[in-house]
Image (cartoon, helix red, strand yellow):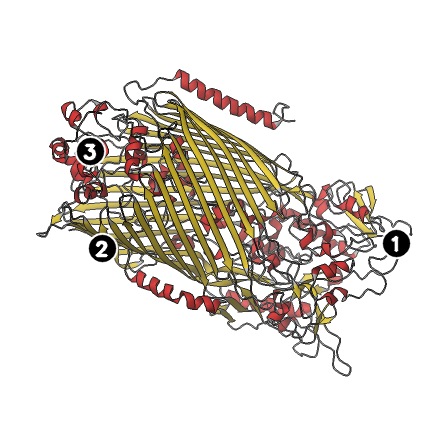
Amino acid sequence: MKNHWQKKTIALCVSAALAQWVMGTARSDSAVGVNTILGNALNPDTLKTIPAGDPEVLDAVPFQRTPTGKLHEWPPIVPPTTTTASGWKYRGEAQIGWMGAGGDTGSWWYNQYKDLPTNGLYLNNFYFLAEQPEKGQGYFIEALGGGIGYRDQYEGVKFGRYNDWKVKLFYTEIPHTFTTSYRSLWSGVGSDTLTLNGLTPGGTRLPANPRVAPNAANSAGATRNNLVNAINAIDDAELSIVRETGGLTFEKYITNAWRFYGTYTKEQRIGERPFGAVFGGGGGGGNVEIPESIDYDTHDILAALRYDDGVNNFNLQANVSLFRNNIDTLTFQNPLYATLNTIAAAPAAPGQPANILDPTQFTAGRFDLYPDNDYYNLRAEYARSMPEWYHSRLTATASFSKFKQDDDLIPPSMYSLNGLAINGVPAANKWNTTAALSKQSADAEIDTQLFDIGLVMRPTEKLDVNGKIRYYQTDNKTEYFACNPQTGQWGRLLNDGTGGAFVIPSALLGTNPALANNPLGTLPTAYNTTGCDLAATQALNLVPNAGNVNLRNIPFQYSKTNFELGGEYRIAKGQSVNAKLEREQYNRDYREREETWENMIKLGYVNRAFSFGTLRASAEYGVRRGDTYNADPYHQFYSASLGPEPTAATTAAASWVHAMGSFRKYDVADRDRLALDLRMDLIALQDLDVGITGQYRDIEYPDSEFGRTDNQTLGSATLDVNWQPSAKLGITGWYTYQQSSLSQAAIAPGSCNIGSYYFYYSDGFVGTVAGVVGGRPPAAPVRRGATVVNTVYVAPGNAANWENLCADHSATSPLWPDSRTWEANTEDSNSAFGLAARYDMGFVRFELDGTYITGTTSVDYSYNPNALNAAANDPKNPATLPGNAAATAAIWQYAGTGMPDQDYDQQIINFNIVFPINKWVAIRALYRYEQGSIDDWHYAGVDGNPVPSFNTVGAGGVQAGVAQAVYLDSGPQDYHTNTIGLLVQVNF
Amino acid sequence: MSIYPSLPRAYIRLAILATAALLAVLIVSCTPTHEGGLKDAPGSAGGKTLEADLTNNDSTYIGEKACLECHEHAAQHASMGVHAAAFRSNPRGARQSEVCEACHGPGSKHAEGAWDRSLIIGFTRNWGTPVATQNAQCLSCHQGAQRINWVRSTHDVNGVACADCHNPMEKNSVTGALVRNSISETCYTCHPQQRAEFLRRSHMPLPEGKMSCEDCHNPHGSPTRPLLKTDTINELCYQCHAEKRGPFIWEHAPVRENCANCHLPHGSNNDKLLITPRPFLCQQCHDPSVGHPGNFYNNSQTAESAGAAQASGILAVNLQSQRIIGRACQNCHTQVHGSNHPSGARWQR
């Protein structure tokens, strides 16, 4: 499929490349598209020129204000303009000179979104405008740019005729640096193949003799040592991408009423970013951070017609966006000695040596990276003003979108798996082609539609009323079944064959439901006989061996309807109150709630009539509720749907439960929401503004005992000051404080084993002992310092027994015992400060601007360590040997009461001195200081301990192999830099 | 013991709301108003409202030259912008050919009584022309297109004037005839909390001049609540993150429905604009009966703690957890936005 589309888009690519040769400003239509600004860090407002203020202001009357009451910018002095003999007027400027930087210029934070010279010639920016102002002419051309040749450069050209037609071309680059402390183990970074440098793919096998089964502990230990040595010998490197975008826009007035608007943009993203890979299955058999290679192209084409005759407005717009990933799959050599599961050595043929399960044969992994996709949107908007009918205005929108991708799927594994078996079924050459899949290409599609209609009317001079109905719907047509047609096995091979998640009939056979799940004679391969026919498999009526194996994809889809009724009443001069009632209703498929609805009321008040400023305030309250919360809406997509529920002793029934009954996912949970907003713009003095802004959000989850719980709050307050006394002097400053908090709770799940006894101790510990059907209850495990306060038996023979006990939490739930509850509270606090000042002494101008932010995120938690311990401290139990007990105590000592605070602060100061030589030339000296410091526990200790997993010493001092965990990104680091520049600004 | 009264929280919230409403009423009734300033005029509900509440209805156009007799310096500034250039060189319609009066209205009476504010339309607070009148004047040329949803948009309801954001008389910005140097700086004048958030540890490149608020929002109105430029938040995000558009064989429910379920678009203290640190964010939804997502992850499992434990000789337990270190859950579930791999149901490939 990809090749087909590659051919189709070649023309577009060529066109885009041509477009990028010539460059222009971004789109001007605020309703569509991105790239609305061209600039970079030294030119955040496109052109940083530091002009002198005009002492005559605009019209000799200073301190003019916007209608809200904010001081106008002090206008820059009108730049010199030259008129040619042919009537063209032009003006322009360019800033060029030397720039250099010192300090930690290689740090991530410094380079995150910018690219400044460390030492060299630098064209900071340029601008040129030529126009024919004479009546009947109106032709113009405008060009600008900055950072030429650097990774954050931007250029634009715009030409045309005012009020008639316009062509715009632009090109911009955005660097995005993810890390500069990545230690790559591979060559080929940025390509579709990563090859290990020096390390043995698949890990080190000990003993090396292929006829002898490898020793897991020794092999893992040797592999770890090799990894540590290799990583320590590697220098830090950068992982980053550059987003290069070029575009073309054409606008044309067809008539006074009709206008055409069309754009084409091509965006290319090239580079690499931190990524992760895991082997094995379940909890992982080893993980390593790999670099993901990025080579994306996105083509966007938009064509629009706009109509306005003064009464009717009509927009018709078509948009096509084509995403192309030039790296379809990413293959990387595996440095780990993986811990395998599910896959096993197959019985050897008679007379042949035994097959050996050797993890080192998995020398590589392969990702199917983001597939090519297509997006189509057709949108029509219509509005009609009806001043004769209560000054009404009708607005209607219809929008239809299609998301589609049909990428070729890839086989689950690159390996033949010769000599191996999955649940007793030979795997050789059954998983390394796409014949192992239920379909060959994704054929995934989601269609959406939006209808929105609103009416505004003014029945009286003082009152506006409005109503609106909005309907949005998604229709997911994607279907995929996880079944191998070659073997008939339901489930999926994991991580290139190193693990698996398959379902077979339960092996507990017989006629007594307390001892058996399936009839005698049931074969483990029974499901395989139905040829991946789901209905036929279900018709076998066999209890599966697990309830949580994915059988097929889940085509999530939803619809959303909004009803809105509002109004505005003008109560006095410049004052109005507004109110709105809204109901938002969701209908979702395959989610915990099929329906949720939120009723909202919003009140607002606007007063522009104060002599001292403007006040805007609003309060909103919303209540979201829904139908019955179903904690397990995914039953039909999991193996639990294949047959009856288990009843036999020794069955681990937890996988049928899927989720705790009282757990609430916050996006569909009951929610009460309060939002308060206040904005006061004060005219303190004729040349001084003060702004006060406050926000408060309080979201309560009243029915969420687990999940996101209690109240989620956010408070934000800002003070703005703007003093502009003259053309020579101006100072602005602001301070913002923000604080937010969020709580969550969960239970570390235990187990739900049919036929087992669960003993609940006075300190919260839960012990488990398997019972004997029909036998005497077993003795509770000995636990020093605690007594058994409750005992629960998960009786076999009837599924209702374990369902009642394990479906939800309780003090005596085997699966969700209350004592294993843990709670966490996350709090964010931030202070941000900004200052900008200018002072003009005539022969020299000074300008200073700077920002400072400090932020802290703290995660505090509470838990019962006794309940979360894995084993009772029974002196007869080897797992509670003194050494192990000490280790367990150490765990909780390190765990403490919370994660270390994530702290950071950053300040950026720009100081400019401008020496105007004459009206054509000025010298600009700039100094930029940046400083940042950051502590993030995610990366604490990674630099010195990149492979923190190690072989454990278990009972009797026996060493056990542990899956490696390899972290190659050491995370963000503190930095400070000084940048200086000496630039000549030439006006012409 | 709670410090709160034993009332249901819903009642307390309603009480807060009622108090806020009461305060608003008190402010309305007790604060002085600016008698000489703003005047009420018919609002913009009728869309193309031309019933300007002025007393210059019988004014006539006097032409740009007459205006320049008093406002020559202003004209020099205005000449830097597109409005004046277009009106002078290629006017679209008779009114635009009047140049200054195309926006300010006919000026004959103003020329006779220059300081009578009711005789000409001004776009400053000082001049006092009602906002509705100002906006109607702008909309007489700029109605429709990207402003088709202006009426009853959030900005319209809150009495925001076109001239609160735009000033065609001064060349403050390269494009857009804005009151500040850039789109974002203009938006920050009323939305300072976003300015602070864009300075946070993870943010989109607005402070670096590579994006503007308008990349995502249409300040002139939209069928969506937060004035989004597309039908949904996700379609908005896909404009720059098209690779996440899919659809995928293996979808992740909250991802498909709303990117903002996990991300704070204006900035975050956490990596990747996340609402809370991983793994705690993921655990706000994931606590399954089997496997690790519901386990309690903690400070004992960082690389630092593991290193310290090793140094202390504690070898019986492997402390580190790939669910805590680095990218946490995404160390293994890398394709959390969706996977096309046949093994990707849990987004590991």
Chain ID, mark 3? B
Q: Which residue is mark 2?
A: A96
Query: Looking at the image, is mark 3 or mark 1 nearer the viewer?
Result: 3
Query: Looking at the image, is mark 1 or mark 2 nearer the viewer?
Result: 1
Which amino acid lies under the numbered mark 2 shown in the image of this protein?
A: Ile
The Cα–Cα distance between marks 3 and 2, rounded to whole angstroms, is 41 Å
> Which label sits on residue B101?
3
Q: Between A582 and A90, which is closer to the camera in this rendering?
A: A582
Q: Between B333 and A928, which is closer to the camera in this rendering?
A: B333
Give the secondary structure at mark 3: helix
Q: Which tag, 1 or 2, sits closer to the chain's start? A: 2
Q: Is residue A622 left or right of residue A652?
A: left
Q: Is residue A873 left or right of residue B99?
A: right
Residue pictured at 13% horizontal, 51% vertical: A88
Q: Is residue A539 left or right of residue A463?
A: right
Q: Which residue is mark 1?
A: A772
Which amino acid lies under the numbered mark 3 shown in the image of this protein?
A: Glu
Q: How far from the left and from the top, in percent, is residue A484? A: 66, 67
